[in-house]
Amino acid sequence: MAFWSSTSVFTSKVPRKILFMFTLSLSVTYLFYSLMSCYNSLQFPLQETYVYQGRLVTEETTFVTLREKLYSTSQGFAEFTESERTTPVSIAKEHAEAEQRTVEWIRTQPSPTKSAAAYHTTALEREHQEFSTTDSELRVNCTSDYGEKKLPQAIIIGVKKGGTRALLEALRVHPDVRAVGNEPHFFDRNYEKGLDWYRDLMPSTLEGQITMEKTPSYFVTNHAPKRIHSMARDIKLIIVVRNPVTRAISDYTQTLSKKPDIPTFEVLAFKNRTLGLIDASWSALRIGIYALHLESWMQYFPLSQMHFVSGERLIVDPAGEMAKVQDFLGLKRIVTDKHFYFNKTKGFPCLKKPEDSSTPRCLGKSKGRTHPKIDPDVIRRLHKFYKPFNMMFYQMTGQNFEWELEEDSETHSSQD
């Protein structure tokens, strides 16, 4: 009782304005130290420990088996597979050296002591359990530009001219997705630069956000599956596929815009047109043998970690395809049909303009080019060439992309 009476006497003698100023100063001091704590954590984040896991695989893969089963009687394809098996010594040596440098980099990373690891674990638990409302608000106010750079949890690995750019731009609308705009080409061209270099390319993310990148050439790069698996064996992979014949023509159209003096599509597509010998070594055609490339990825990743997007349905029903992608990534379905409108000039959907922008977000001039007219007989021969590979791809993925229906419609239209 003496305590309470003395307290009441004290508060009665002290003017309310002084009490108010005292309380305000304490609040400002608390806010200042909270912001400083946030700043320090951003400038000097706790060192993350990444687990790099790989597995040994024999040089004998099922590539050859798949090729022999599907095209054992195709001379052109047989010649292609035989030449592909021979790898230049210099390239093999370069790849081996890159792999060795990565292994050494992983081995030389400082391992935290038991006490440091225990502190890190305790700090993380405290971070999740003891944050007050004020602390949470402060963390949100630390914008994504001040977040933490992480290795990607999902990658769009292919395919070229399938619709990967459209998919990435639509995903970037989602507030929980942070993606690199340019293609890093880390696992095919820049692997020797190391994972630190790769991580530094990534955008900063906050807790709950997904880091992504897209490089379509990964899907057809032989050593990419093993390298990605060594970085993160639980990573999610997205593959955008399109009718391989249409994709090849689109690929050629892009090259033609840069090199107008290249031979015609018909010349490049055949080793011997009279004999109907397809030149499967031409990259524009080789990329479309999806079953061949998928076989390599399935040696390292289960289908449950892969999601296949139909390039055709991405055009006619972008919201539907985006719903599936968001489900696969474990994201809330935020990108919906209200975000798209169909651009008749380009012939594909574009993103509606944001409220703070005066122009809609549509893909650049390099997208939606008019394809050159190709001899219908060449298109028919290519459809016949791809058909067994497409059937195998449908079986491997458990999805029917119905590219044969497109072939039938083209045949009927040419007859009409």
Image: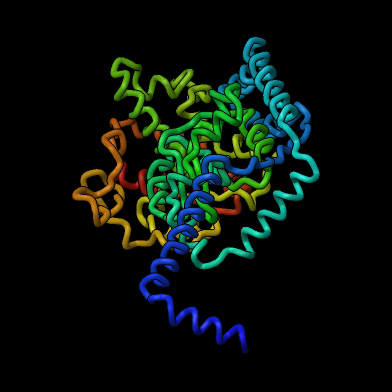
Viewer-side residue, 282 vs 228: 228
How many numbered discs sit on the rendered protein?
Answer: 0
Residue visible at 56% across and 22% down? 76
Residue at far bottom of view: 1
Say which quadrant the N terminus sits in: bottom right
Residue at far right of view: 114
297 in relation to 344, above or below: above
Viewer-side residue, 254 vs 74: 254
Residue at far top of view: 90
Residue 272: % across, % down:
47, 18
Residue 359: % across, % down:
21, 48
Viewer-side residue, 120 vs 343: 120
240 in relation to 352, above or below: above
Residue 398: % across, % down:
60, 53
259 in relation to 194, above or below: above
Residue 388 in sight from this viewpoint: no
- For the rendered model, the colour scheme is rainbow
**Image position of 155 (left or right of 52):** left
Viewer-side residue, 2 vs 398: 2
Residue visible at 39% across and 19% down? 267
Quadrant housing residue 219: top right
Quadrant housing residue 75: top right
Residue 29 in sight from this viewpoint: yes
Residue 191: % across, % down:
59, 25
Residue visible at 49% across and 79% down? 10
